[in-house]
Amino acid sequence: MAVSPMSKIFLNGRFSVQSLSGVQRFATEITRALSEIWPADLPRPELLTPRTDPAVSIDLGFTARSCGRFQGQIWEQIDLPKAAASGLLVNLGNTAPLHLSSRHSRQLVVIHDAGVFSTPQSYSRQFRAYYKVLHRLLALGKTRIVTVSDFSRNDIARHLKIDPARISVITEGADHATRIAADRTILKTHGLESRKYVLAVGNKAPHKDFAALDHLAATLAQRGIRLVISGGMNGRVFSAGAPDLQHATYVGRVTDAELHALYSEAACFVFPSIYEGFGLPPVEAMEAGCPVVARDIPVLREICGQAALFGRDPSDLTACVIELLDHPDRAADLRRVGYEQVQKYRWTIAAKQLLDIMREEFVKC
């Protein structure tokens, strides 16, 4: 089918001016991967961003252009659709404009999960109200919806009351976890010894359920092993979670190089979350050669396969971690299987999947 030479492709670059968390990580990495595989027969996308001071300096491989006069959600709903009126708009971070200025324009949005519906207690009242309305209205229009797991597709479809077949599924990647050399100075900073700690990564939102690790932290302390927790908390998005665990060491937000070191030197990684759309930290751990213990929920079974031990409750999670500590051969087996499993999660693979969907939507512009 012939396409109009006036048609263009735009990327919603709002993520590039936000703090880096799971959704922003996805958007950043898949944008970089798209830039590396972009085909010659499609117009090269333009990354549209809000105006910032200083200007955004992150290099994502595409030409970036700041536009409009607003910020945040208002920019996305007012300025962005005007700037993207002449083509396909690709939104990678859960949100998208409800109205595009041109009847010739189209858009797709990657909605990572249905957390505001399934675990509303994890989100601030304002945040979940906005997302619920936004996602329901996007589902009523012609916006193409994409997500990152079969579980998430079914959960989103259930809450938005649409056919799951309307939602396309792509994967995520893990190769960013080892792209930057490990910075082991963080181990010295916090007095950590190789294989003498267990790592957990995430924020303290209720659905991450770090409270489930209290039993593990106390058990490890009796063995002279520390539970180390890395991550931050965005209070505008998430509601308050559990208080800090008494026997855990909190290292806060860390750089990619520091996180690489924490993963690669840990005895194992534990992920107690009760709800995810994909679950990026476990595959990051596999990428870095760290055996994984995960909560026994459908999406983590889907993503981790046979490359993790699964626990249903706090005592199960503790038992799984102790099994790996007491049986080094079992931990070595998980490292091997994890390495095989993680080969499915490369950003180039995800970018190719998204590119196919973008091509389908572009010819409709």
Image (cartoon, rainbow, N blue to C red):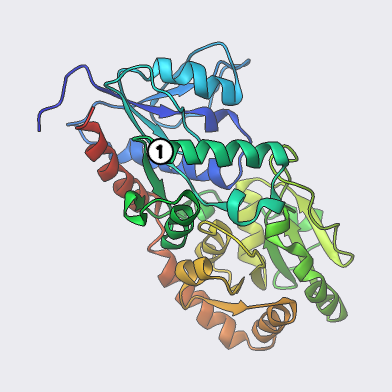
What residue is disc 1 on?
140
- Say if residue 93 shows up in the picture: no
Is residue 291 or residue 192 the one in the foreground?
A: 291
**Residue visible at 33% across and 45% down in the picture:** 354
Q: Whole-percent x and y of residue 208?
A: 68, 59
How far across and how far down the image is residue 110, in percent? 43, 43
Q: Above or below — where is 54 with respect to 241?
A: above
For residue 291, side relative to residue 345 (left or right): right
Q: Position of residue 105 (x, y in %)?
A: 30, 24
Left or right: residue 322 compared with residue 174: right
Graded by Cα atoms within 10 Å as few (under 14), some (14 to 19) or many (20 or more), the crowding at tag 1 reads few
Q: Can residue 245 be seen from the camera position used here?
A: yes
| Residue sitting farthest toward the top | 69
Q: Quadrant of the C terminus?
A: top left
Relative to 98, say whether 143 is above or below: below
Taking depth in this image into account, of 99 and 293 the one nearest to the observer is 99
Disc tally is: 1
Outermost residue toward the left? 1
